[in-house]
Image (cartoon, grey):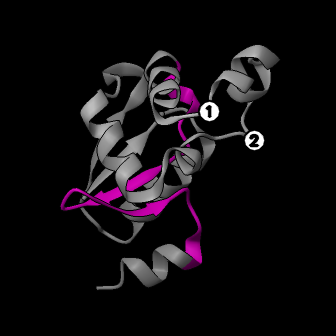
Amino acid sequence: MKLYGIANCSTVKKARAWLVDKNIPMEFHDFKKLGVNELLLKTWIYQVGWERLINRKGTTWRQLPDTVKASISDESAAIHLMQEKPSIIKRPIAERDGKIVHLGFDESSYNTLFRK
């Protein structure tokens, strides 16, 4: 399994701690340090849609000028924004075998998804 996010994000920290506590092996990909490529974003968009990948509740979105927010109206614009500002991506993204298994962190959902 691979977990995508930002190391200092409190939600990502909770998800990582939960996985470690349950002895569930995972590889962590930090958007801030390693970036995110267009092919990966397109794969995710195909699975869940670009609208679900953008975190509109976070600080990064709220700090964007209204003109930039209004310009995010299609996949291409969303990809450009997510590559330019990876902290705009909803996180964490849990991926197994190339498929998103969960977006965000919710302990009860993780308990169901990652039962041994």
Crowd around label 1: few <14 · some 14–19 · many ≥20 (10 Å): few
Indicate left or right for 93 with 109 as reference. Answer: left
Residue 16: in magenta span = no
Residue 88 placement: quadrant: top right
The amino acid at mark 2 is Lys
Q: Position of residue 5 (x, y in %)?
A: 45, 39
Image quadrant for the C terminus? bottom left
How far from the left and from the top, in percent, is residue 48? Answer: 45, 57
Viewer-nearest residue: 71 or 6: 71
Depth check: 23 or 49 in front? 49
Q: What number is the disc on residue 57?
A: 2
Which residues fall within the magenta stretch? 85-108
Residue at which label 1 appears: 73
Disc number placed over residue 101 in the picture, else none: none
In what element is the residue under mark 1? loop
Locate the N terminus by quadrant: bottom left
Residue in the foreground of this view, choosing between 108 and 93? 93
Q: Residue at x 53, y 76 (%)?
A: 109
CA separation in Å, label 2 and label 1: 17 Å
- Amino acid carrying label 1: it is Ser
- Closest to the camera, between mark 2 and mark 1, is 1
- Residue 16 place in picture, x, y as percent: 43, 53
Residue 106, placed above or below residue 55:
below
